[in-house]
Amino acid sequence: MTYLMSDIHGDYENFCRIREMAGVSDDDKLYILGDLIDRGEKNLKLLGEVRNCPNIVLLKGNHELFAEMYLDGSISGRRWDSWGGKSTRKELDKLSSKEAEELQDYFYWLPKMEKITCEGKQWILTHTGYVYGCSAYNENGTINTEKTIQKAMAKNEFNYLTSNDLYEMNPEKEWDTTLIVGHYPVGLMRKNEGIVTFEKNYINLDAGNGYRSKGGRLACYCLETGEVWYV
């Protein structure tokens, strides 16, 4: 089975709970679409769990990018704190220089997009999916999903991983491949529900776990069955 999650935000306990609820085994594949860290209190424990599981693929989100930028000196601790990274920063500050350098390299090389085929249908997994001005079109007028993402990432990684443009664009536009994303909790922000949202061109898995005080939850989605679990 193929399972997908996003925006766990350092919530180790609920990550373990939802894997058990969904019955994710070592024989299954689990994709996490970014923002594994920040806001929660057990960021490195969660990261260690994910890195030690060969059946888990972590994609790069903006919060992994923030950690990388802090470790390479591109942003200050104060800036990262203002973006929700205070708890992770405190954990990283306790690492040795060798450990910090190794983790910086790990964040740098995280993939930002995966193409998968499930039940005969192709999907593209990524954290945000779109930046205005970076559309690439097919001859039939549909948006070429893969080339559009590649164009945005090549232009500016930071802008791509922090963009909300996908969730604000004209929903009538046709994409040639359905996206599965996270980053912006559409259900929580627009419907006051911590839910996975199924839109015309994308599925958004961010159910607002980074905003649990506002009703957000952590979600896990099975691609084969369409079942969703929440904690």
Image: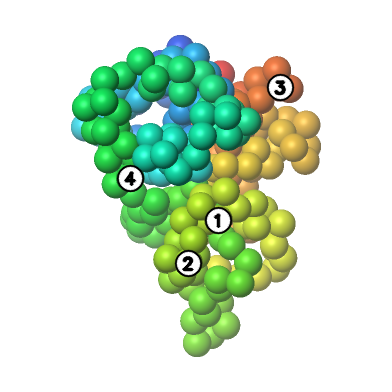
In this picture, is 108 found above or below 168? above
Nearer the observer, 216 or 36:
36
Which numbered marker is on residue 159?
1
SS type, badge 3: loop
Q: Nearer the observer, disc 3 or disc 2?
A: 2
* Residue underneath mark 3: 215
**Where does residue 182 sit, x and y in percent of width and height?**
54, 42
Lower position in the chain sequence, tag 4 or tag 2: 4
2 and 1 marks in contact (CB < 8 Å):
yes
**In the picture, residue 65 is in which quadrant?**
top left
Quadrant location of the C terminus in the rendered image: top right
Q: Using the rendered image of the protein, determine whether residue 26 is visible from the camera's viewpoint.
A: no
What's the CA distance linking mark 4 and mark 3? 32 Å
Crowding around mark 4 (Cα neighbors within 10 Å: few <14, some 14 to 19, many 20+) is some
**In the picture, residue 121 is in which quadrant?**
bottom left
**Where does residue 34 sit, x and y in percent of width and height?**
45, 39
In this picture, is 156 found above or below 18? below
What's the CA distance linking mark 3 and mark 1? 28 Å
What's the CA distance linking mark 3 and mark 2? 35 Å
Residue sitting at 71 percent across and 57 percent down?
168
User: What amino acid does circle 4 point to?
Assistant: Tyr
Q: Nearer the observer, disc 4 or disc 3?
A: 4
What's the CA distance linking mark 4 and mark 1? 16 Å
What's the CA distance linking mark 4 and mark 2? 17 Å
